[in-house]
Each structure stands twice: as structure tokens, then as C-alpha cells.
Image (cartoon, rainbow, N blue to C red):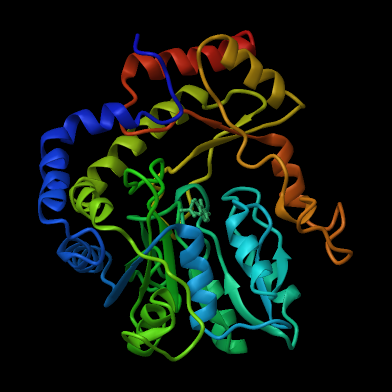
Amino acid sequence: MKPIQMVDLVGQYQKIKPEVDAAMQRVIDTAAFINGPEVKSFEQELGTYLGAKHVIGCANGTDALQIAMMALGLKPGDEVITCSFTFVATVEVVALLGITPVFADVLPGTFNIDPADIRRKITPRTKAIVPVHLFGQTADMDAIMAIANEHKLFVIEDNCQAIGGDHTAADGTKRKSGTIGHIGTTSFFPSKNLGCYGDGGALFTNDEAIAKKLRRVCNHGSDVRYYHEVIGVNSRLDSLQAAVLRIKLRNLDAYAAARNAAATHYDTAFAGLEHITTPERSAHSDHVFHQYTLRVTGGHRDGLKQHLEANGVPAMIYYPVPCHLQNAFRTERFPEGSLPVTEQLTHEVLSLPMSTELDNEQLAHITATVKSYFNQ
Ligand SMILES: *Cc1c(COP(=O)(O)O)cnc(C)c1O
């Protein structure tokens, strides 16, 4: 059996190596490293794939979130409602801009933000909602957009983990995750579903005026070189990464299918196993399985993790400490106990290996090892 990794990026590269190597060589041969034709082509191709009018590359997914908030003019004193059960970047950029992060709890089945709790957390200072489409499926965007319209709030979708999946509205309309709110953001960190070979990120929007502001913020606040309209940042997707991403984008649907096949294998093996809850499939979203995350109850999570690791199966806890209990972000407004579902999940979640390259032998070993912990 091939050794099992959380993500097998080398195995994935081997299958596209000739194309990727040629594309990278093409960039090097032309020295069009910054804002070259590869970046423009990738932005257009991703826009077509997503059904988004504007795609703007940037340096990473964290920058994408920050640029979105800067372009919307969010400022100190404003409040942004987001979840605490997320990767820190979502909350970090809010705090970095002097905006106040306000946390809504998540739903125990999908791990995504609870619209009912968003409503409870709205104040006169609330300016935006940032749902995080965690682990590969979208938050309840129908409910979130209804709340946003009612209260005139912006919606920035943190789509770093769910790119490629469809969201299905109540009327049956399908739209790609990240294209429903005012702005969608994503990360091309290597292990993401659409990952490059270094850092990268992008923003998407269907609003022309917002697109213009996003491009300006990314580019030192400038539309015309050496003339600066607003304070911006320097955040670019580089051409080598764009060249890789053009190839990987063509495989994205096949990658999602491979991830779903592994997830189905896991679901079947764990059906009915006591102390294990397999990930809920949302009724309004595809699942692209950025992570396959179990809930392990009865206090067995850490023991199971050790047992897996002792038997050659890596497993990870995403996330062990929620943002509101991190030393960097603790406030009196969100003490321990204030987000009960989020806090409970941090004690129960366990993510199993998930990649485009898992074979049946590896999957069988992983599921047998989980079962053997429970003497099954
Ligand atoms: C990965 C990730 C980010 C940050 O992306 P980087 O490219 O690493 O900056 C932000 N939010 C979520 C939910 C992520 O998973």
C-alpha cells in the first residue's frame, strides 16, 4: 500500500506533469512574470467556469478577504458577522482593519453559520456578513441573502474551501459557490481544492463598480500608474501560478468527483457505527469535500486520532480552538460558553485523509482502522 497522506499533491502532479511543466516553461521563456497573459487568461477562464462577470487574482486567500472589506469601505467601528468555527484568516483580517468581528454560532450538522444566530447578532453597526463555506459545502445562502437584503448588509462569501460546488436556491436555480453574495473570495493554497504551487487567491463579483474597486485596492489604490485614489495594497496572482491554475481548473470537476467517491466510501463504511457521525449533506449545496470531517462523540475523538496515527493513518483536527477563544481575539462579548455548538464541535471533529488520489486499498485500510478502534 502507498503511504497515506492527508493530501497527495505529488501523486496529483504526476498525472498532469507534462502539461504543467510546459506551461511553467512558457512563462519563464517569456519572462512575463507579473500581470502577464496567463493571469488574464486564467481570470477569464475562472469567470466563465463560475459564471462570474469579474474575477480578480490576488496573492492569497487572506488578502482576498482583506481586499474585499477595504473595497466595500468597511471601517473601524463597523461590525462584521462571521463564524468562530473557521480558519483564523477570516477573523484576522476583520480585526486587522479595526473592524469588530461578531460571531454567530454554526449548525451542528453542516458546521456552517446559523442564519438564525446571524439575525440575533445584528446591531445598528453591522455592515457585512461573511459566511464561510466550510469543508466544501455552502452556507444557507438563501437565508443569508434574505437577511442581508432586509438589513442592507454586504455579503462576502469566504469560498476558500468550497470552490466548484453549486448552491441550489429554493426556486431550483443553481449558482456556483462564491457567486451569490456581493463578493466571493478564494485561496489557491496548494492543498485547497483548486490549489497552485505556492500562494495565490482570487475575488469574484458580478458587480462592475465593486470589481473596479477591488482591482484598485489590489493595485496600490491605483487605476492609472503612479496616481493613487485610495490606500491600497500590493496583492497579485503571479503568472507561474496562473499557468498552473489554468491546467488544474480544467480538472476541477474531476477532482471533485474523486473526492466525492472517497467520501461515499467513508460514508458507507461508517454507517451505523456508534460514536461516529458522518458529514451531513446539505440540501441546498453540492459537497466538494475539501475535508471529510467526522464528529466523534463519547469522548473518543483524541483516542481515535492516536489509534489512527499509530496505524499509518494521518488525521487532523480542524479546528481545535475556535477564533473567539484564541488569545489574539478574546473579548468580553464572547466568553467561553457563548457559542455552544462551535465549542462542542472543537471537541468532536476529526478530519480523515481526503484527496484526489486515494485508492481503494488506502480507503479500506483507513476505514478498517477506524472500526478496529471501536472493536468492530
Ligand atoms: C485557506 C483559507 C483561508 C486563507 O487562505 P490563504 O491563501 O492561506 O491566505 C481563508 N479562509 C478559509 C476558510 C480558508 O480555508
Which sits in the foreground, 323 or 362?
323
Tell me where residue 193 appears, x and y as whole percent: 36, 46
- Determine which quarter of the picture holds residue 211: bottom left
Q: Is residue 144 left or right of residue 172?
A: right
Location of residue 264 in the rendering, given as x and y in whole percent from the top left corner: 39, 32
Q: Residue at x 45, y 55 (%)?
A: 160
From the viewer's perspective, is residue 139 above or below residue 277?
A: below
Image coords of residue 356 (percent x, y): 32, 33
User: Relative to 334, does residue 67 appear above or below in the rendering?
Assistant: below
Q: Is residue 331 left or right of residue 76?
A: right
- Residue 225, x across and y down, in percent: 31, 84
Please indicate whether residue 201 sits to the left or right of residue 280 in the image: left
User: At x 21% / y 45%, what residue is drawn?
Assistant: 251
Q: Front-most of 238 and 316?
A: 238
Quadrant hosting residue 132:
bottom right
| Quadrant for the C terminus in the image | top right
In depth, the one of 189 and 366 nearer the eye is: 189
- Position of 282 relative to 275 (above/below): below
> Number of callouts in the render?
0
When the figure is inspected, residue 367 is found, relative to residue 110, above or below; the finding is above
Q: Please identify the quadrant where the N terminus is shown.
A: top left
